[in-house]
Amino acid sequence: MPNIVDRRKFLTTTAAGAAGASIAVPAVASPAIIASNPVVEWRLVSSFPKSLDTIHGAGDTFAKALGEMSGGNFRVRVFAPGELVPGMNAADAVQNGSVEAAHTASYYYWGKDPTFAIATAVPFGLNYRMQNAWMYQGGGIDLMNAFYQRYNIIGFPGGNTGTQMGGWYRRQINAPEDWRGLKMRIGGLAGAVIAKLGGVPQQIAGGDIYPSLEKGTIDAAEWVGPYDDEKLGFSKVARYYYYPGWWEGQAMLHFFINMDKWNALPKHYQAMVRSAATMADIGMMTRYDLQNPAAIKRIAIGGAEPRPFSEAVLEACFKASNEVFDEICAKNADFKKVYEATLAIRGEDYLWFQLAEHTYDTFMMIQQRKGLV
Amino acid sequence: MPNIVDRRKFLTTTAAGAAGASIAVPAVASPAIIASNPVVEWRLVSSFPKSLDTIHGAGDTFAKALGEMSGGNFRVRVFAPGELVPGMNAADAVQNGSVEAAHTASYYYWGKDPTFAIATAVPFGLNYRMQNAWMYQGGGIDLMNAFYQRYNIIGFPGGNTGTQMGGWYRRQINAPEDWRGLKMRIGGLAGAVIAKLGGVPQQIAGGDIYPSLEKGTIDAAEWVGPYDDEKLGFSKVARYYYYPGWWEGQAMLHFFINMDKWNALPKHYQAMVRSAATMADIGMMTRYDLQNPAAIKRIAIGGAEPRPFSEAVLEACFKASNEVFDEICAKNADFKKVYEATLAIRGEDYLWFQLAEHTYDTFMMIQQRKGLV
């Protein structure tokens, strides 16, 4: 059975053919020429500081995979926020071509157009399995790229946090009324929902959250989940650690790539990019799923109180979210089209997952509480 | 900023250098030579017939990704079961080198050693998120490969079904006693547990299940989940469609590769194999998550009765499973080592998932039942 063709012979043959030398050599097989791996050097700006090692690390996974698959020739250098551009300007830097790529959260750019948000997370949206199903098989990647194209960007999924925690609160949220007047560090569409509930959403950068909570300038703040939240020490200044983060049933990160740089890639490098992004995507989720359990235990031992939002509280938030979506859909046809595509999958999968998945997990969680798993 | 080096110039340069021609050219960059893509032709036997298009398709995804990333030079031809070897002999064919690779379920080979089973699924084992966390980040891939090495095999995750259904039953399972005397088509470790419960496990090939159920030769049969089960029409001969398949909280497929063929690959082709397997892995899960919802609805409309196993039934099965595991661990140190590695993750993640993930999903499922999602 044919296997690896002798590499030296292959190179010599191809070489002579390409150079047009007059020595007698066998005919050149054109696919072999196409598949040589040219040197490509890309700069990738991450929106996430190195201290968020799981999220930032997804950019490193992407770069490493491309390097390995190209024999070291597709070289991606990862830059932390601020090294080249501020983290929240990553999409702009890609759009204008000042960098080739970014690892970022699409919903950071919802101010340009709320359609950006759907690729990451929207309140009461898809969970992890559903977001992947939509993106990888349900047309999500293509639908988002039809939209990103206007920004000269092509994007691929590149990481996930799973369902996030609902954040840190200096006072309890026992009823829907308790959102009223609550000053909370929360952004994007979730902030619009908090406002509809009577709260006061605030935009505060990561490093400023702790002192703001400590001083009481804000009453609550959301961040990510146990592993990342623990590092910022929120439990010392806000006792109640609510769940779930109903605005992030999952949160998917993306690799954004300048369209001109993308089009300039050989086809097989484009295939590597898709594949490397997928490696980063699954790599980030699995890292969180290994890291979060120990972190939540340490947080609880440290005195924080993990608490579920009540069903009544969640119902009020769900209702307020739907009002926000109705308003956006009424005036933004792009958002409506993409959002409705996700709703179709959400309805279908939340029926199906009630059966095998949820029953299995619920039984196992009961055994866990009994100390049997 | 440096970007894609002109390909024509690159080739000419490399070519002349490699051919040792005496024309004046710049020095050859050796990484570029290493990274050329030699022609490799592999045969991959799938253990899954083309009729199981989602599972079989994961092999196709793997082949396609490798072809695309290598510019068409890493060529994997996928064979259905029986075309080269029977589906259940895939591992042997890889071990003895008669094919380079297989797409198969590791647990098919539990008869050689039950340790094989853990890479796929064991009763009351990990769910999808946990299995991925264990495999990709928790040392699972390496731990299994230390074991597979004895069979001259290296393996990588390559697909998942998620939590399977519990199968089709001609009579109800309302209490643990109802397993007694139940003749059920079920294999592997799950069969050993069924036997411990008083049932009679049977090994029956896919095509023979329907007539066996119809004639009453067997009382029950497990297969996969709605999308695959529907095709075999089980609902016509066994009314009760129980869930969950407690022996498959997830079921992970693998690509098995002959170790000598693996070692003969250039490093960058090895990186492509890992990456292509990951593409197949996520591709298969997302396909099921899109396909199962519509199938379960059609099955229910067709007159089958989806029913949950009661908590008491599941508790009895859990207890019987643990007895089986204790017996195996007592005499198989490999199994014990690998199984205990999974238990650590199971315990941790079933604590953590109770918070954000489960609360979010449960709330959303309640809304689904209200017709609000």
Image: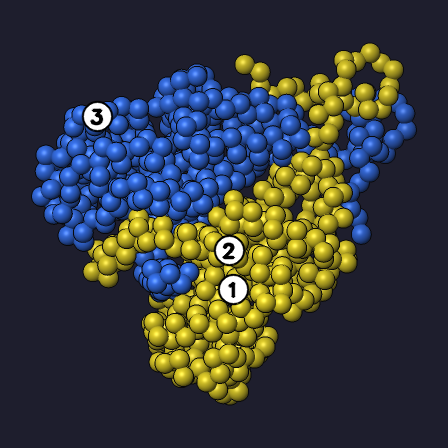
Chain colours: A yellow, B blue
Nearer the camera: disc 3 or disc 1: 3
Residue B103 occupies quadrant: top left
Q: Residue at x 16, y 28 (%)?
A: B216
Seen in the image, is A303 located left or right of residue A364? right
Residue B258 as seen in the image, left or right of residue B130: right
**Callout 3–callout 1 Cβ contact below 8 Å:** no
Amino acid type, callout 1: Val
- Give the image location of residue B1, x and y in percent: 80, 52
Q: CA distance from mark 3 to mark 2?
A: 41 Å
Determine whether the residue tagged by mark 3 lies in a helix, strand or loop: helix
Marked residue chain, label 2: A
Given residues B31 and B294, the one toward you in this image is B294
Badge 2 amino acid: Thr
Badge 3 crowding class, 10 Å Cα cut-off, few under 14, some 14 to 19, many 20 or more, is some
Residue A46, visible in the rendered structure? yes
Q: Nearer the viewer, residue A206 or B237?
A: B237
Left or right of residue A263: residue B50:
left
Q: Residue at x 26, y 41 (%)?
A: B304
Identify the residue under disc 3.
B212
Residue linked to disc 1: A122
Q: CA distance from mark 2 to mark 1?
A: 10 Å
Tell me what residue is drawn at x 18 percent, y 45 percent: B317
Quadrant including the C terminus of chain A: bottom left
Chain label for disc 3: B
- The single residue placed furthest to the top in the displayed view is A24
Other-residue count near label 2 (Cα within 10 Å), few / some / many at <14 / 14–19 / ≥20: many
Q: Secondary structure at mark 2?
A: helix
Residue B52 percent across, percent down from the top left:
40, 31
Residue A315 in percent (x, y) is at 39, 72
Q: Label 2, on which residue?
A: A342
Which is nearer the eye, B276 or B49?
B49
